[in-house]
Image (cartoon, helix red, strand yellow):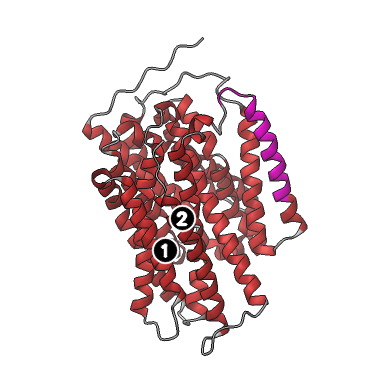
Amino acid sequence: MMPAAAPTPEPQPLNRRLILLAVCLGAFMATLDTSIVNIALPQIARDFGCSLVQISWVMLIYLLMNVSLLLTSGRLGDLLAPGKLFLLGLLIFTGASALCGVSPSLAPMVAARALQGIGGSLMLGVAPKLIALSFGEGKRGLALGLFSTAFATGISVGAPLGGIITAYLGWPFIFFINLPICAGTFWVGVRVLSPIKAQKAWSWKSFDLGEALILAGTLGLFLLGLTWIQKSGWTAETLGALGLAALLGLGLYFRERRRADPLLHPELWRRWPFVAGSLAVVLTFAPVMGVFFLLPFFLEQVYHYTPGQAGFMLAALSASNALVAPFGGYLADRLGSLLILRTGAGLVLAGLIALIFTGPDTSTLGLAARFIVIGLGFGLFQAPNLNEILRGVKPAFIGLAASTNAVLKNLGAMVGITLIVSVFAWLSSNHASPDLGVSPDLAVFQKVFALAAVVAAANLLANLLPRKP
């Protein structure tokens, strides 16, 4: 029997700040590359001479690799030194960014983006664990709030930054911009992250490669099926991907039952606070991200905003989310996580209800106020909820718990976008009857916003339940 790994002593205050800076920069870059590339895809497609479906793989492969490997990254963060694993992910991400920038055609670009996704999953999978090991429960809320801010900021600034870089420097520089940021992050992190020891001794009994591959295949095929629903509906390909994901998931279930240390560990899923927090993640991200995906079409089709004006309006939601996230964690440390996350869930619901009652006479300021309320609620919710999920979790399982949370964020977003797009398409094709004086387009949008509000109401009710074990 191998000896247990030595516990890592709590870092000094300066080291804690440097650890937080490094993991926040890593989160910023990993999420930045989910959005910064999107704006440059038309130019890349023209240069490579490929179709819209083909170029979509530049985005899709990054998301699939990132999300499908997050749980495995969290498990490795429990069994290996998490700081060194984060630095390895950073190096893979850096090298892949350089390869993306010099790619001469689509195939090398997609392969490099897959490598980027692997590097990003390693960073995001162990980052919350590094924060949890560095900050005690009474100080963790602010740190998780700052991490959520970095996460949100990467998504928020990607599109405008990508547009500026593509216009003035060319699309390769949307990848080259990662190189100096990665170098700075490595310089900051190498001295403070390397000494952090693994919480469990390595054992092949604790890591099953076949289990990790089946889980990655299950999540990847599920996300691929959801993506195809949005693009082409319930085709044979879509049903095949979802059916194969279900079969792999069933196989994973029976394989996990025979293992003493499974990825979907009962140590976590038997804890009510973890289950409740995980459900809340899905029920929060589904309506917010589903509506966020639809808002550009709403602003351009109903209010006839230009793409630039629509982007500026959406920045109100993204910026309010990013600005309030650290305060959500700070307040959770002092007033209690449940009070703050319930307040956030209530604000999200209030903002979505207000969207239902938008009309032709709604002012720009009125629209922006609705977006800000949703962003404030979204920002207040995330860090306190993650803090509650991690509260009381043994150090050996923190990495797995945090990476599970990251996977559920992405799954919630994908489910929400698919639900919103599918219902919107169904209502539009059935010519839903609007009220007198309301345009058909606006009526359809209002009904979809009402559906999102119903999900947000279910989320608020779920969060009112107690989370004590």
| Residue found 48% across the figure and 82% down from its top | 304
Q: Secondary structure at mark 1?
A: helix
Q: Disc 1 vs disc 2: Cβ atoms closer than 8 Å? A: yes
106 on left or right of 410: right
* Image coords of residue 407 (percent x, y): 52, 44
Magenta stretch contains residue 243: yes
Extreme top residue here?
1
Disc 2 packing (10 Å; few <14; some 14–19; many ≥20) = many
The span shown in magenta is 241-261
The alpha-carbon separation of the residues under discs 1 and 2 comes to: 9 Å
In the image, what residue type sits under mark 2?
A: Asn
State the residue at coordinates (55%, 65%): 43
Label 1: which residue?
Answer: 349
The image quadrant of residue 357 is: bottom left
Tell me which numbered mark, 1 or 2, is placed earlier along the sequence: 1
Q: Tell me: 455 left or right of 395.
A: right
Q: Which mark is residue 49?
A: none
Res. 289 visible in picture = no
Could you say where residue 146 lies in the image, as x and y percent from the top left? Answer: 31, 47
Query: Can residue 291 be seen?
Result: yes
Task: Give the dominant element type of the magenta stretch: helix, strand or loop.
Answer: helix
Against 145, is 361 above or below?
Answer: below
Give whichever of 423, 156 is nearer the camera: 423
Q: Quadrant of the C terminus?
A: top left
